[in-house]
Amino acid sequence: MGYKYRSLFDLWQQSCLRYENLTAFSDNTEGVSVTYKEAFRELCYLTSKFQEFGLKRYDNVCLFAVNFPRWLIIEQAIITLGAVCVSKTSEINIKELDYVFNNSDSVVLVTDNKDIINHFIESDDFKKNVKFVIYIGNDKYDNINDVKIYNLYDILKGLTEETIIKTDWEDNPNDTAYINYTSGTSSSPKGAMLPNVGMSYVVEQLQKFNDIKEGKTFVVTFPLSSAGGKSFNLLCFSQGCRVMYTPYKEFYNVLDKYKPDYLHCAPKIMQTMHEKLMTEVKNKGLYFQQVYNIAYSISKLIQNAERKCNTCAKILKPVKKFFDKKIYKQIRNTLLKDEAIAFVGSAHLAKPLEDYFDIIGIPLIQHYGLTETTGLAVSNTLETQKKHPYTVGVAFEGTTIRIIDPDTHKELPANNVGLITLGGIEILKEYYKNPEATKKAILEEHFLNTGDLGYVDKEGYLVVLSRYDDVIVMSNGYNVYTPLLENEAKDSEYVSQIAIAGHGRPYLTALIVLNKQAYEDWCKKSDNTEVSPNFNEKFKLFLIEHLNEKIKRKADWKYYEKLKKVYFIKDEFTQENGMLTGTLKMKYQKIIKTYKKEIESLYEGI
């Protein structure tokens, strides 16, 4: 197949010529606003300056920063020279950043955090090997111990309207553009070497699945250090959008102020949005709650009927319109405008959540990919998400999905659960300095073993079930795909987060982070003294029964897929405590290991 973009630089050049006077990147304070024309000039100028500072082709450069308007410009300047960008958010543990910098053999550091510079500057190896440091900040940072430290904004001051810049840079599409370190959900981080042409191919394919409009606003939630987050930034950039960056703590204020057109969200964010919308229902008073509950129950019946019968959809359309106008519009517009679209990735979305957003009229599109696939390889469209709910879509045009038996590696027919493998131009070349991991991940014909379990239906739509390593094998020999159960349980108003345990055990248990307000409300309604939930036996019995009723809704539910005991955890799973990845996926094995003592207490006496 022919490609629209020869390379990432070609993507930038085409986009900036086409949309030169539109805003490309901004922050939510509107303190920074960069047009497409300015972005391209800054890119070319920084490429020249980096070359002047000593950066060369095949050098590795670590970019440690939070999302900000010039991230992609810096990154592309590195790649345009033929160097390799190694990126992580600067908010993660310094030990992980130290590991990434040293494991990647990087010779340049770009960061927005002085503490990170101060950490590395103490190392003799760093002082010996690093070529220069770029500090992203508004204040000065002087050279230390003969290490050249440049301020990004001081560098950019040298670019004026009169500055003549080289614009005919040409990066090599076969070069490695990124070394993206995996988030380590089930193992130590590995540096996936991703091809330049792989990212431009992913963006081109995403354009075919998503009708992104020129001049619209895209609010970023995924870290730009993630391949999936990067690909959606570049998708919206390539289509003439304004890409807006904001800290997550200000995310909902930005939704309220700007009413963006597009969002790229992890399932965890969609769950939070659901909670906020349900709080809005409560805030409208008892009468509205009662009307809402009746309408939602009817809407659920309508949704089920529509999915089975096209004629039903036409007949029931007036009822849907009435409910939408009188009820759902009032709720969704507290967060999003009617035309807004949520793109959902990083993990599969719980079925009840997908049903909910469909009913209240917030359209979403699910997709699938990994760091090792340069972000994405499979996607739905708005139309196919409705026709094929609970799937993540079909493979990109030049990508192949194969479902194989985990033991024999024999390809399985449609609707059979097995390991998901992917082949295509976007697949990583190899893991940096890790031939053992490469050999394990790359199968015959350069197919990637994703480590995920799932199946492809007869129409080619992919359903993702679980990480292969996260499957619980109970003592009775039964396999349990815990994310499917967890997704059903998270539909409960009492559950903020949940991790199900039971490997090698006769029954399932769960670690739960409670929704504190919901627990307080339950105690008041049941005239139950509010104590620590771990000592509230009445509540525990109620919640276990309540969650099992939720779990029983799962397709092909088995009698052994039920919780027997629960333990309530005080602290949330977060990126800061190492329990979530940068894209808000649970590090399941780490959670189970961290709370081993608490889990053991749930199996005492057996």
Image (spheres, rainbow, N blue to C red):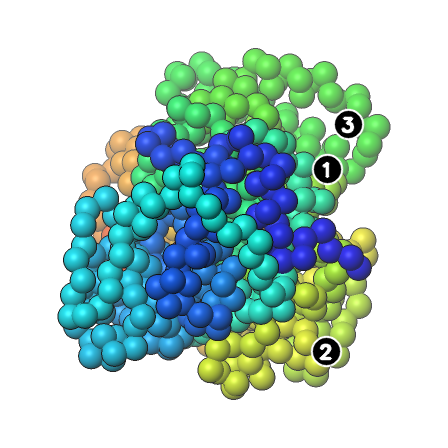
Q: Which residue is mark 2?
A: 445
Q: Residue 326's spot in the image, x, y percent?
A: 57, 13
When asked about the image quadrant of residue 302, the answer is top right
Q: CA distance from mark 3 to mark 2?
A: 44 Å
Find numbered disc 3 in the image and state the secondary structure of the residue it sits on: helix
Kindly tell me whether residue 159 is visible in this rendering. Answer: yes
Residue at the image position 73 percent from the left and 42 percent from the top: 384
Residue 60 in the figure: left or right of residue 16: left
Q: Residue 12's spot in the image, x, y percent?
A: 57, 48
In the image, what residue type sits under mark 2?
Glu
Closer to us: 291 or 81? 81
Sequence order check, earlier mark of 1 and 2: 1
Q: Residue 365's spot in the image, x, y percent?
A: 62, 42
Task: Judge the density around disc 3: few (<14), some (14-19), many (≥20) Cα neighbours within 10 Å.
Answer: some
Which label was assigned to residue 383?
1
In the image, what residue type sits under mark 1?
Glu
Task: Judge the density around disc 2: few (<14), some (14-19), many (≥20) Cα neighbours within 10 Å.
Answer: few
Closer to us: 171 or 522? 171
Q: Is residue 559 above or below residue 245?
A: below
In the image, what residue type sits under mark 3?
Ala
The answer to the question of whether label 1 and label 3 lie on touching residues, with beta carbons closer than 8 A, is: no
Q: Is residue 194 above or below residue 71?
A: below
Q: Which residue is mark 3?
A: 313
Sequence order check, earlier mark of 1 and 3: 3
Quadrant, the N terminus: bottom right
User: Which tag is nearer the camera, tag 3 or tag 2?
Assistant: 2
Task: Judge the density around disc 1: few (<14), some (14-19), many (≥20) Cα neighbours within 10 Å.
Answer: few
